[in-house]
Image (cartoon, coloured by chain):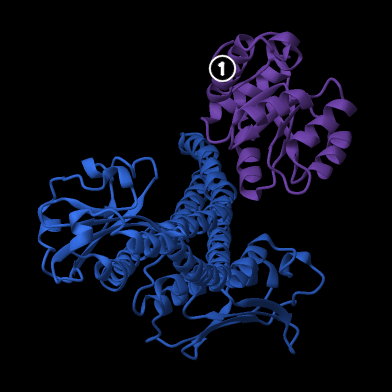
Amino acid sequence: MRAALVRFTMLSVVALVLLTVATLVLAERIARAKALDDARIQGMGIANRLAAPLVDARVRAGEPGATDQLDTVMANRMRDGSVRHVKIWDQDGRLIWTDQTELAGRTFELDDDVTALFGTRDATAELSDLEREENVAEQGEGELLEVYAGAFDADGVPVVFEAYLSTERMEENARTIVLSFVPLIVGSLVLLLLVVLPLAVSLSRRVQRAQAERADLMRHAVLASEIERRRIAEDLHHGVVQDLAGLVYTLPTLGRHLEPDGDRAIARSLLDRATELVQRNVVALRSLMTDIYPPDLEGDGLARAVEQLAHTEAAATRLRVEIDVDPGLTLPPDTAQLAYRIVREGVRNVVKHAGATSMRIALTTDGAQVQVRVVDDGVGPGDRPGLSPEGHLGLRLLTDTLRDVGGRLEVRRTDGGGTELFARFPVSMAG
Amino acid sequence: MVTRVMLVDDHRLVREVLVELLSQEQDLTVVGAAADAPESVEMVRTVLPDVVVMDVHLPEVDGIAATRALTRLHPTLKVVMLSSSCSPTLLKDSDEAGACGYLVKGDPADELFHGIRTAARGGRPFSTQAAALWRSMHDSGARQGAPKVRSAPSARGGAPDSPGEE
């Protein structure tokens, strides 16, 4: 049971870890998409509002001093470190302006997606791999956001503005997302686990209890069967075996009396005794057979079985038997078996110990509970330990079995001084 | 010489038919029949039998305890067990209690006569089944290297006499 609980908890923890990892990956992706959006908007803003209006024919021609104002404005913009580098391209792939002065005026081959931006105010952004020829200066600066934005200079000539932005903001965004979502997800999972775990514990306890009850029931059933077998062996030993041994010793005597000098009258009486002995043992063996192979209790079998049992057991002691069992009574197989067992135990106790002249057996049900009553007019339970549920092994076991199924067994003295065995248990037995 | 035999058995029928059966034999005379252990101890004192035929299963005090008491009180008395069961434990316990033999109820009547005569002569009567069991117990005990020599019949007075051997 503990293993099942540990397994449940481990699985919950694994689910928790997987969800957390998934959240982190998702947060990073969302942060990156948001950062690229932001970078595009920022790039377009710088291109259109700050950089492009300061590019004119003199700047494009590379005249000395023409870029002073552009130099100042860009330097200011780049001071906070959020914009690392800036390049302004013309349609021929020539660098009109860049903060990396050693590259100014050089021409590079532009990618198609960059060329497509000339004459538009569109922008593209990506996480730069910085492997292009023009990126010689940026390599070694780690990951950067690369933005290209189309713009028109002071003379209306199309230019492309290129900027490299720091990923710090993107990382900050990812952190914010993770910090706001992870506690929520982890928290709700932990909360769920806290709610479910006690339920799982109580469920597992119930399963464990049910298993223990079933084991008890099983143990008592095995014990009952063992006691029954011992009783059958004892009955055989004290009854049939002794009688047959007696017969073995009777027959040679009988044989001698059949000799010419024997006494025919003695032989006749011995033969009568031998016949009676054999008949008695056939009856005894038939009764034992019923014990070994219990009667069919399906349908109306229970009422018939109780009747047969009572009359067979009572025959030898000339007990008057009164039976009160509804002939139409049908019970589930296990319930019928238990009811029959109780009747049998009660009847045997009456026959063996009670010294009674009459016995009444009642087997009734109100739909939910079965009631079994075996009442005699004998000497009563008295002080003999054999008839108290504590003292009699068969009764003690029956008491335990009834307790297992949520019932009870009582042995009490009747008003008339006899004994009443009373049992009550649910029709639909637990376990 | 007539052998004085006393029977101990709690089954009335068995007692009665045994008395009748043994009375047919010229050299055996039944001097008493007891139904339980205390009665047997009391009866031996008064009837002075040569051989007691003792049932193992008796109510309250069993035949093995009764045998132990009888052989202690009367060291020359021969007690032969007569039971419907025969197991290694019963054989061993009977032997330790001082019984000189073990017969099984339901075996032919001749074996009973023979057993009582063997016991009276100081022999060790064992029914076929009991003798086979004894041999097997003794052999396996010897093989295990721990034979209880004192309890083995051979150590106390020769091998068990199987019925039919004179």
Instruction: Give the left or right position of residue A25, taking residue A272 as reference.
Output: left
Please determine whether, in this image, residue B154 is positioned above or below residue A81.
above
Counting from the top left corner in percent of width and height, residue A274 is at 48, 49
Please determine whether, in this image, residue A147 is positioned above or below residue B21.
below
Chain B shade: purple
Q: Which residue is mark 1?
A: B136
Image quadrant occupied by the N terminus of chain A: bottom right
Please determine whether, in this image, residue B113 is positioned above or below residue A259.
above
Residue A302 showing in the rendered view: yes
Q: Nearer the viewer, residue A282 or A404?
A: A404
Instruction: Give the left or right position of residue A307, taking residue B139 as reference.
Output: left
Q: Residue at x 83, y 26 (%)?
A: B71
Q: Residue at x 74, y 46 (%)?
A: B35
Please determine whether, in this image, residue A259 is positioned above or below residue A235.
above
Quarter of image, res B63 = top right
Instruction: Give the left or right position of residue B164, taking residue A293 as reference.
Output: right
Quarter of image, res A159 = bottom left
Q: Name which residue type carries label 1.
A: Ser
Q: Residues within 10 Å of mark 1 (few under 14, many from 20)?
A: few
For disc 1, the chain is: B
